[in-house]
Image (cartoon, rainbow, N blue to C red):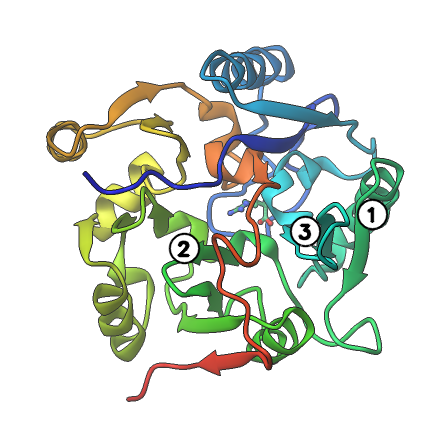
Amino acid sequence: MTEPLAWGRHYVAVEPTHFRVDYAINPFMDPAVQPDPALAMEQWQSMVATLRGLGARVDVVPQRPDAPDMVYAMNLGLALVRPTDPGSPAQRHVVMSHMRYAQRRMETGSAQAWFAAQGYATSYVGSEGVGAHLEAGDAFAFGDALVVGYGPRTEELALKHLAGDLGIRVRGLRITHPGMYHLDLAFCPLDERRAIVCPSALDDASARALMELVPEPLVLTEQEALTTFAANSVVVDRTIVMPACPPRVRAQLEAWGFEVVVVDVGEFHKGGGSIRCLTSPVDVTIGRDLPALARGEVVLPQL
Ligand code: ARG
């Protein structure tokens, strides 16, 4: 049996006390279609209760009243547990996002203060602090690398900074689909060999690279990814918490030995995000989940 992911048992989420659709920065958002605040809160609470029921820890960050998208905690920053000198405790570190759109930039300042108060070291990509746009919903540990989507949100330059700053291998995938503007809408690692993937989010070379990267992929059609948000799921050990699961997808997941739990977070689809976007894993470890390199390295697909 393939080993389960070693991460995905500790998350940060933002309580949706001020969730609204005030502007449109992705194709799902329409300020004329607002979420129901009470229903959104109920859906979020049942998602958090489900994760905790599976044994995951979920830490809750308060939402800034002026930051309606802050509920999508995945994008606040890329958290990694970093090795330190032998004998000293590992350091929790967050590379804060530098958001593409001005409407979300204030989120990271508040998140940075919260993470710092919890004892995390924080930084921004690039030595000057504003090196390049990075949105953490584009970055996932898988195999021998941090797999990072770039294009709509994260800039290619951020990949170089991440690899160099963290001493890891970064594999870049170029996102071209406007509806799958973050990698987490098209890629969900399931265990060490398997992942849900939607290659139609990417250009041809990156789609091929993604299929080569995942030994056993579960491929979603463009339609499935966009209408069900099925790739925007969270895995706790052998259980996949999904916003929806088409029968074909469920059959494959169950044949692989996973249990599927569906939690409706439909109100959050109005902002263009689902379960993965609402939760940020903070237990990916460099040296265990991500091999450390003496010097970082960026691998881009060749056309
Ligand atoms: N409205 C948010 C945005 O466009 C949605 C973010 C979804 N988050 C994600 N990790 N895909 O930035």
Q: Nearer the viewer, residue 250 or 1?
A: 1
Rendered residue at 59%/28% (across/down): 34
Give the percent coordinates (x, y) of residue 295: 59, 82
Is residue 81 shown to the viewer in this render?
yes
Nearer the viewer's eye, disc 2 or disc 3? 3
Respond yes or no on whether mark 1 lies under 8 Å from ligand 1. no
Spatial CA span between label 2 and label 3:
19 Å
Q: Nearer the viewer, residue 2 or 226?
A: 2
Asked whether the beta carbons under mark 1 and mark 2 sit within 8 Å of each other, the answer is no
Sooner in the amino-acid sequence: mark 2 or mark 3: 3
Q: In the rendered image, which residue does mark 3 sit on? A: 77
- Report whether 107 appears left or right of 296: right
Respond yes or no on whether mark 3 lies under 8 Å from ligand 1. no
Rendered residue at 29%/41% (across/down): 3
Spatial CA span between label 1 and label 2:
26 Å
Q: Are there few (<14), some (14-19), or many (20+) residues within 10 Å of tag 1?
A: many
Up-down relation of residue 169 to residue 65 (above or below): below
Sooner in the amino-acid sequence: mark 1 or mark 2: 1
- Res 112 label: 1
Q: Amino acid at mark 3?
A: Gly
Q: Amino acid at mark 2?
A: Met
Q: In the rendered image, which residue does mark 2 sit on? A: 180
Q: Amino acid at mark 1?
A: Gln
Sooner in the amino-acid sequence: mark 1 or mark 3: 3
Is residue 182 shown to the viewer in this render?
no
Position of the N terminus, as image quadrant, is top left
Asked whether the beta carbons under mark 1 and mark 3 sit within 8 Å of each other, the answer is yes
Nearer the viewer's eye, disc 1 or disc 2? 1
